[in-house]
Amino acid sequence: MFSESRTTHPGGKSSVKTYREALNEALRQEMRRDPTVIVLGEEVSGGAGCPGERDAYGGVFGVTKGLLPEFGAERVLDTPISESAIVGAAAGAANNGLRPVAELMFFDFIGVCFDQIFNQAAKFRYMFGGKSRTPMVLRATVGAGFRAGAQHSNMLHPIVTHIPGLKVVLPATPYDAKGLLIQAIRDEDPVIFLEHKLLYDLKGEVPDEPYAIPFGEAAFHREGDDVTIVAISAMLHKALAAADELAKEGISCDLIDPRTTSPLDEEAILESVEVTGRLVVVDEGNPRCGLAADIAALVAERAFHALRAPVRTVTAPHTPVPFAPELEDAYIPSVEKIVAAVREVLEA
């Protein structure tokens, strides 16, 4: 069981659920609450037009399994293998009274539908003077370690974080997955909701009742005075292991998971650095123009006076994701690299 954040959990009954089950429960509860919520994507209902049992898959990672029998084919829509059609249909539906939750199997495929995201959905509210709303969610998988090759394994969250008009969410725990997805569905703006493939089987305590986690509020998973660690998405769990190892040496870390990169909880990061004077940012994204560099720049600009050492970033290298297992494992930031970075800022 991973450590819970400082976030107050809602009262009532809870149970241990996987990250996948938490997402499924969020979708199910919101579809029951609001008849305008629909789900669309490839194989989300099991493969329309194919022989055999419908709802056999529930999407390639099983997140939407069981929704078709309860809500029917009019609200759980299998689509052609066309990312531009999926996102374009979702944007249009969101502008006409529905709350679509669209699924892309892999976020690497945003190149196919980037115009619908960047030039349409993200700009509707601005272009129409605030009179238009686009309450759509785009769910997609990110991250390496799944042995899926360079075209299915990237962390492309910095690209969409850069775009005004989008909200970008990267839940790292089952508790956050459910609460943030409910918030995303209820939001009036387009939300990019990114799920790391290696987290789907992660288990954690999740309330059974619906609850929403506000965007822009970071979660604190460890409290300490020596070093601030900011860890994004699945890197939270590498950072937790590193913090536990460092604690054996008497080094205490303030460990922050931003949970959303747009909006970003800047104040939580800055307030922590004011106390510790040291910062290590851990992100699986590539280093150039990435989130680690962005957060490092934020602290250098607004909390330089508090820094006792240069900021360190721990990221993937600036290369495509390797397919060879040994190289892919070396590509992903490790516990050892995080520990080494913390020691470096302390020694400095």
Image (tube, grey):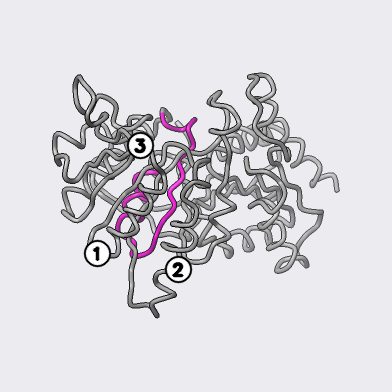
Categorize mark 2 by other alpha carbons within 10 Å: few (<14), some (14-19), many (20+): many
For badge 2, the amino acid type reads: Lys
Earlier sequence position, callout 3 versus callout 1: 1
Give how far across and how far down residue 65 sits, in percent. Answer: 26, 31
**Residues drawn in magenta:** 177-200
The CA span between labels 3 and 1 is 37 Å
Q: Label 2, on which residue?
A: 123
- Give the secondary structure at mark 2: helix
Q: From what the image shows, is residue 132 above or below residue 39?
A: below
Earlier sequence position, callout 1 versus callout 2: 1
Q: Which of the two residues, 125 or 301, is positioned nearer the viewer here?
A: 125
Give how far across and how far down residue 18 sits, in percent. Answer: 36, 31
For badge 3, the amino acid type reads: Glu
Give how far across and how far down residue 133 sits, in percent. Answer: 33, 69
Q: Label 3, on which residue?
A: 205
For residue 187, which quarter of the picture?
Answer: bottom left
Q: From what the image shows, is residue 298 above or below residue 210?
A: below
The CA span between labels 1 and 2 is 16 Å
Q: From what the image shows, is residue 254 above or below residue 188?
A: above
Label total for image: 3
For residue 185: magenta?
A: yes
Q: Label 1, on which residue?
A: 96
Give how far across and how far down residue 339 sits, in percent. Answer: 72, 35
The CA span between labels 2 and 3 is 37 Å
